[in-house]
Image (cartoon, rainbow, N blue to C red):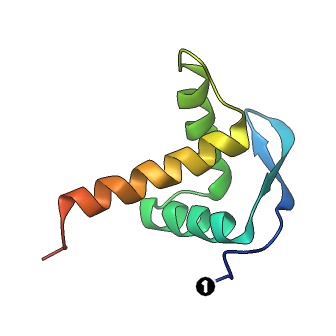
């Protein structure tokens, strides 16, 4: 696992046919790759889904913030569900 104390790294992803740059700390990039792998989709597809959800919000955050929030909500949901049997 990447050290949690590292400056953001900028990466390009394609969303709806256009490239966009996202700056996330390496820990969040790692978590995003893991989530995409677990869901069986490319990272760009997961980012596109998060982007659609973000845009639908009453007060949408920026895309990088939305990704961090999505990942945090995913962790909270897993913690609330308890251990996997």
Kindly tell me whether residue 46 is visible in this rendering.
no
Residue shown at the point (61%, 40%) measured from the top left: 66
* Residue 58 visible in image: yes
Q: Is residue 2 above or below residue 77?
A: below
Would residue 59 appear left or right of 24 to someone viewing this image? Answer: left
| Image position, residue 27 (x, y; %) | 65, 71
Q: Which residue is mark 1?
A: 1
Left or right, residue 84 beside residue 18: left
The foreground one among 17 and 1 is 1
Q: Position of residue 34 (x, y in %)?
A: 53, 69
Residue 25, by quadrant, is bottom right
Foreground residue, 21 or 8?
A: 8
Residue at (64, 57) in percent of width and height: 43
Residue at 23% of width from left, 57% of height from top? 80
**68 sits left or right of 70 in the view:** right
User: Quick one: SS at disc 1?
Assistant: loop
- Which residue lies most toward the top here? 58
Q: Is residue 79 above or below residue 65?
A: below
* Residue 69 image-quadrant placement: top right
Instruction: Characterize the local packing of mark 1: few (<14), some (14-19) or many (20 or more) Cα atoms within 10 angstroms.
Output: few
């Amino acid at each position: 696992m990447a050290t949690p104390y590292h400056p953001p790294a900028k990466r390009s992803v394609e969303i709806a046919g256009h490239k966009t740059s996202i700056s996330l700390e390496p820990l969040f990039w790692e978590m995003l790759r893991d989530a995409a792998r677990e869901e069986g989709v490319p990272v760009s597809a997961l980012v596109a889904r998060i982007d659609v959800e973000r845009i639908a919000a009453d007060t949408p955050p920026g895309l990088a913030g939305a990704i961090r929030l999505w990942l945090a909500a995913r962790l909270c949901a897993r913690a609330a569900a308890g251990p996997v049997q």
